[in-house]
Amino acid sequence: MDRPDFANNLKIKGLKSTRHRLAILEILEKSSQPIAAEQLFQKMKEMNITVDLSTVYRTLDTLCDKSLVKKINIDSDSRALYEYNRMLHTHYLVCLGCKKITAIKGCPLEDYEKNLAIETDYTIAGHKLDIYGYCPKCRNARSAGGSVK
């Protein structure tokens, strides 16, 4: 699978290609799950990119405004999380133990949404579905009476 051309994507959206924007897009694109601004900040420091946390937040706001990044709010996490916008409709499984977030393939609500629109005469604009539970590792730790670190 080809990597996105971040510099071109920024240009198309009318943004300059800066080190901070490119780094954030690359980190998010490589991440297997949505991550918080603080985690981005740490990863940028590990990449020897000098940046302030406030710059990370401002950059994320800009990238969200241009639909290059999606901001996600999960009920069990007080922080906003961010992911590279692959232009896919996504729902999530959220582990209540370790807070791992896993994207669900496909949308289990497509047919329901269509039927609901017909039944209620609403024009449905969208929906959000997050499912909470315990991943296998946390479930096994809970049943063994331990805790997951």
Image (cartoon, rainbow, N blue to C red):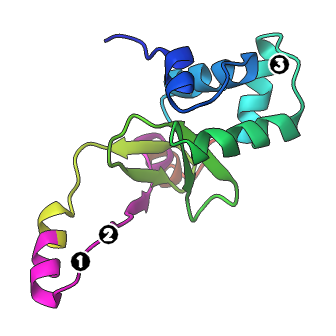
Q: Residue at x 32, y 48 (%)?
A: 89
Q: What residue is disc 1 on?
A: 123
Horizontal side, residue 80 vs residue 68: left or right? right
Task: Look at label 1 and name its amino acid.
Answer: Thr
For the residue marked with disc 3, what is the amino acid? Lys
Q: Secondary structure at mark 2?
A: loop
Q: Mark 2 belongs to which amino acid?
A: Ala
Q: Which residues are magenta?
A: 114-139
Q: Position of residue 72 (x, y in %)?
A: 55, 53
Above or below: residue 91 compared with residue 126: above
Question: Alpha-carbon distance for marks 3 and 1?
Answer: 46 Å
Provide the residue designation for mark 2. 125
The span from disc 2 to disc 3 (Cα, nearest Å) is: 39 Å
Q: Residues within 10 Å of mark 1 (few under 14, many from 20)?
A: few
Return the x and y of residue 143 as percentages of the image width and height. Answer: 46, 53
Residue 36 visible in the displayed image: no
How far apart marks 1 and 2 lie (CA) works out to: 6 Å
